Every structure is written in C-alpha cells, then in structure tokens.
C-alpha cells in the first residue's frame, strides 16, 4: 500500500479544507481500504470523516427523509421510518454484503462503491477505468457480472450497489458540499455512464463531499419490492436486480418506478418503461412490455448475454410480486 | 483547521514501494478488552494487524484480508466489523473487544460454550471470527429461523463446512435468552 498522510476531520469545513486533488475521504473503509491494499486506489492523503455529524436519519419538513452520509447501511436498513415508508431501501441494503460490512459501510460510501470487475481490481490487467488508455480486458474476457446497458467501447463495468438501485427508484437526491458551496444532484444524474471517460463515475468534483441523501415523501398506497438474482443465495453481488414501486388504484397502475441493478454501468432507471405501465391494468403482457423496453438497447457480451433474458424475467417477477392480487 | 491529528508522513514514500517503510507513525489510544491501550502505528496498519502484531492478540485471525471471509471479526463499540478493512488510526477512543476479551477458559461466553457443546468447528481457524460475529448477532435484529441465522452469519466463511453445527450453537444460545 502506498504511504499517505492521515487527517481526522472534526467538521465538514475541516474535511473540505483538507481535501485536495489526490485525497480520499474514508468512512467505513470497506471499498477504499480493500482497493488500497490492491494498489487500485493510491490516495496521497486519507481524510477520516467518521467524526463528522452526518450519521443521523431525520424527517424533512416536506415529509421526506434525510439520510446522513455517515449513516451505516445496517442502521438505515433497520431504521423504523425506512422500514415503514421506504421498505425497498431496507430490502436492498439487507440483500447486500454481510452483517459486518453493513455495520461499517456508509450511505455516502455505498453511493461511491466501485465496480467488481475483476480486471479493474487487478493492476496487471488492462482497464480504462483504473488506468485510462490501457484498454478493456473485460470486453472479450470474463464479464459474467458486468453491464449490458450504458456501456461503451472503453468500459463495460457494472455498478455493484444494491442501495443505489433502491435510491434510483425512490428518486433520491444527493446532497453535496464543496469548497465552492453546496449543491443537490438527483440520483439519476449523479452517476455517469463510461462513454470516453470510464474513470469518471460520478459528477463529484475533486474535494467535494456527499453529506446526505434525501428522499421525497413516500408515495401513498404504493407497494414495493427489491428482487435480487445472483449466483449464491447470500453475500453475493447481483447478476440482475429490480427495485419496483407501484401504486394500483381501481384496477389501474397509477404510479410506477422501476430501477434495475447488476445490468447497467449505473443504477438503471427507464422512464419509458414506467410510462408504459402507468394508466394500464396490471397484467403479465404489460410487465413483459416494460421489460422489453428496459432491455431494448442492451449490448451484451458472449459472457453475459444470458442477462438480457434474466433481467427481463427479474423485472416481470418483481412487478408480479408488487401487484399481487391486482393482476387480472 | 481544527482536525485533531494531521501527520505528514513522507510524501516521497508514495513514489516508490522501496521507500514504503519510511513513513511516519501515529499515536492511537483505544480500549481493548477492557484495558486502555496506547500505541504508535503506521497509518497503513489495519486494526487487524495492529491487534495481532503490535498488541499480540493473535486470537483474531487473518483470512482473506479483504472483508470476504470474516475471520478477522471483532467488536468495535459493541458492533461486529471486519478488522481487516479498517485502519487502526481510525479507532482513537473506540472500545474494541476481541475473542480474548469475550470469555476465558474458566468463564466461557455463552456462545463459546455453545460452540463447544455443538461441535461448531473443525479446524478452528474461522472460529474466533464466527464467535465474535455470533455474539454480536445476539443484539441485532434477526429472525427466528435457522435460515435467518445462516443469512446473518453469511459474512463468516467456514472452509471445513461446520455451518450446520454453528447455526445449532447460535440457536441454542438465542433460545435460552
């Protein structure tokens, strides 16, 4: 591991002041320290933000929820307000990692979780994300766990987070502080697809800090589910997952939000698929149509072509579950 | 700025692995198994390596060193964590419990006694991590079934495959409490 300077910040101001171009904030450490041991991440400075007052989960004046960036995944998953009003987030969090990791991993850190592409994690391999311009060993290589949507000729890495899929369906907003002030970014605009710059994964500028994630008020009468399909029953990343929030009233889908994980370079939401469901009666044909829309632009590799059908079935199953009893 | 510690530890060392040992050291103070301990550590030292190599508490094991196997599980402020994925310097002021502090041969923690009673191990390498994970699990939200316990213990890998007896040991303690 490379040497680094270590700073413990006591306030957000401290943290922003200490942050420079090559600095990394550390919260739970479950991604950063893992990747520092592999020499994949080599920050010249590490700033410990665990003492910042950003761990609370509180209601917002509009009836939404503010989840502090340092709120641990386990605490968010078991928070009574999250379980009651945003159960899809609780389910997604509990489907990921292990009990120990969820006690450590933070909300902000999970937003910035790095891909599990084996070539990204191996400094001997070509990887445009880790070493821009070096190529992509995953294209034509081992890519079972990688993306089929939002990829580019330079990178097919998938976003591994379950939390982020639920946050996308919940239309969360990422609250950011930086030396030049605060800003709020909708979750759908926070992560970037790789295009020509796979090394840029989010809109965060160097030195900016995620301070919280805010959720809008819960949708009255809606049902939700998080369905995660994977190679092991537990403690494994998704091959395909779906966070679905649907409200059916009078036999008609009034509200539908769909986000998928394991298949995209970022948490994958498709507004057209949601629009195709809204105003219709819940039915297997409608669910299949929505799935076709989501996967229409898929660009699979030989090693992950199975995910096109897997993802369709994942979404149909999730929609079936969430509209249970309302399907005619 | 008012950060509590700001240590510059040789920026030239970052340029070359050969110079990696020429780094500064930081003081950290934490309570380990009920005793306040102060030590000087390389900022790169994990909590796991510090427990084992500096404090000679070798009950906590190193398996994968990447948070995947759970052999390094300890309690920090009462919660189970992977000590391999945390720098020791991040734990100034924390309260840490390792398997050495959980019980003693003459006064076993109920989970330790249950692992003996139910034969919850074979080679024993993963056992300290299993026991630290299981003892913390007792105070976490967890369903009643064996499947719930297996899911909650998914972060502890047992290469001998003693899972069935591990779950039985944990369930016997939960049913008694």
Image (spheres, rainbow, N blue to C red):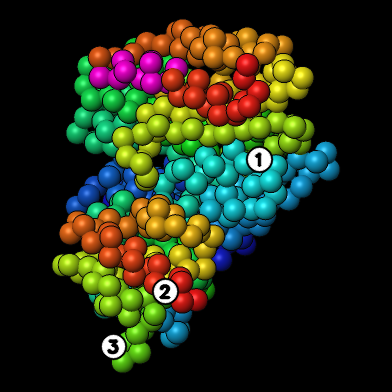
- Give the chain of mark 2: B
Would residue A247 be visible to someone looking at this image?
A: yes
* Chain assignment, label 3: B
Q: Are marks 3 and 1 in contact (CB under 8 Å)?
A: no
As measured in the structure, the alpha-carbon distance from the residue carrying label 3 to the one carrying label 1 is: 46 Å
In the rendered view, would you say A288 is above or below A136? above
Pointer 2 or 3: first along the chain? 3
Q: Which residues are magenta?
A: A303-312
Any mark on residue B105, and which? 3
Report whether residue B40 is seen: no
Identify which residue is drawn at 70% across, 31% down. Answer: A222
Question: Dot 3 lies on which element?
Answer: loop
Number of numbered callouts drawn = 3
Q: Which residue is mark 2?
A: B173
Q: Nearer the viewer, residue A257 or A69?
A: A257
Position of residue A157 measured from the top left corner of the image (x, y, whole percent): 37, 25
- Percent position of residue A317, x then y: 49, 24
In screen coordinates, is B167 left or right of A59?
Answer: left
**Image quadrant for the N terminus of chain B?**
bottom right
Dots 2 and 3 on the same chain: yes
Q: Which residue is mark 1?
A: A86
**Which secondary structure lies at badge 2?**
helix
* Rendered position, A113 above or below B170: above
> What residue occupies the far right of the structure in this picture?
A61
Task: Give the Cα distance between marks 2 and 3.
Answer: 18 Å
For this rendering, which residue is in front, B51 or A313?
A313
Q: Which residue appears at 36% of the width and 34% of the height?
A: A230
Mark seen at residue A35: none
What kind of secondary structure does the magenta stretch mostly adopt? helix
């Amino acid at each position: 591991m490379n040497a680094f300077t270590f700073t413990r910040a006591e306030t957000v101001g401290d943290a922003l002041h200490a942050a420079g171009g090559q600095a990394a904030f550390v919260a739970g450490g479950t991604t950063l320290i893992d990747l520092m041991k592999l020499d994949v991440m080599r920050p010249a400075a590490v700033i410990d933000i665990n003492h910042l007052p950003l761990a609370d989960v509180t209601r917002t004046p509009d009836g939404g929820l503010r989840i502090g960036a340092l709120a641990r995944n386990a605490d968010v998953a078991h928070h009574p307000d999250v379980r009651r009003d945003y159960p899809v987030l609780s389910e997604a969090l509990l489907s990921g990692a292990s009990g120990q990791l969820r006690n450590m991993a933070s909300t902000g850190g999970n937003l910035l979780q790095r891909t599990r592409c084996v070539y990204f994690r191996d400094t001997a391999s070509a990887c445009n994300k880790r070493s821009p311009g070096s190529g992509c060993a995953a294209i034509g290589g081992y890519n079972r766990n990688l993306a089929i949507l939002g990829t580019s000729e330079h990178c097919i890495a998938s976003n591994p987070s379950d939390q982020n899929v639920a946050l996308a369906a919940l239309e969360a907003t990422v609250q950011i502080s930086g030396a030049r002030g605060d800003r709020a970014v909708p979750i759908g605009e926070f992560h970037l697809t790789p295009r020509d710059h796979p090394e840029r994964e989010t809109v965060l500028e160097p030195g900016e800090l995620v301070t919280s994630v805010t959720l809008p008020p819960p949708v009255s009468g809606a049902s939700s589910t998080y369905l995660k399909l994977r190679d092991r029953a537990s403690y494994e990343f998704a091959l395909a997952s779906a966070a679905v929030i649907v409200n059916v009233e009078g036999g008609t889908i009034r509200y539908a939000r769909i986000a998928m994980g394991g298949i995209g370079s970022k948490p994958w939401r498709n507004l057209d698929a949601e629009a195709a469901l809204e105003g219709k009666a819940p039915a297997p044909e409608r669910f299949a149509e929505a799935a076709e829309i989501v996967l229409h632009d898929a660009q699979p590799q030989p090693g992950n072509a199975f995910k096109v059908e897997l993802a369709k079935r994942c979404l149909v199953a999730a929609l079936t579950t969430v509209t249970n009893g309302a399907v005619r | 700025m008012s950060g509590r510690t700001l240590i510059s530890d040789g920026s030239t060392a970052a340029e070359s692995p050969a110079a990696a040992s020429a780094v500064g050291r930081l003081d950290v103070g934490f309570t380990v198994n009920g005793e306040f301990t102060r030590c000087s550590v390389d900022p790169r030292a994990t909590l796991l390596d510090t427990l084992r190599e500096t404090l000679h508490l070798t009950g906590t094991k190193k398996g994968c060193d990447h948070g995947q196997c759970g052999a390094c599980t300890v309690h920090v402020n009462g919660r189970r964590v992977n000590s391999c994925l945390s720098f020791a310097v991040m734990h100034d002021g924390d309260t840490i419990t390792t398997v050495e502090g959980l019980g003693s041969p003459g006064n076993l923690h109920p989970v330790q006694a249950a692992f003996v009673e139910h034969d919850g191990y074979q080679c024993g390498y993963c056992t300290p991590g299993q026991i630290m994970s299981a003892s913390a699990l007792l105070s976490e939200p967890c369903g009643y079934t064996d499947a719930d316990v297996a899911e909650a213990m998914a972060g502890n890998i047992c290469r001998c495959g003693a899972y069935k007896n591990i779950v039985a040991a944990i369930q016997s303690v939960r049913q008694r409490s």
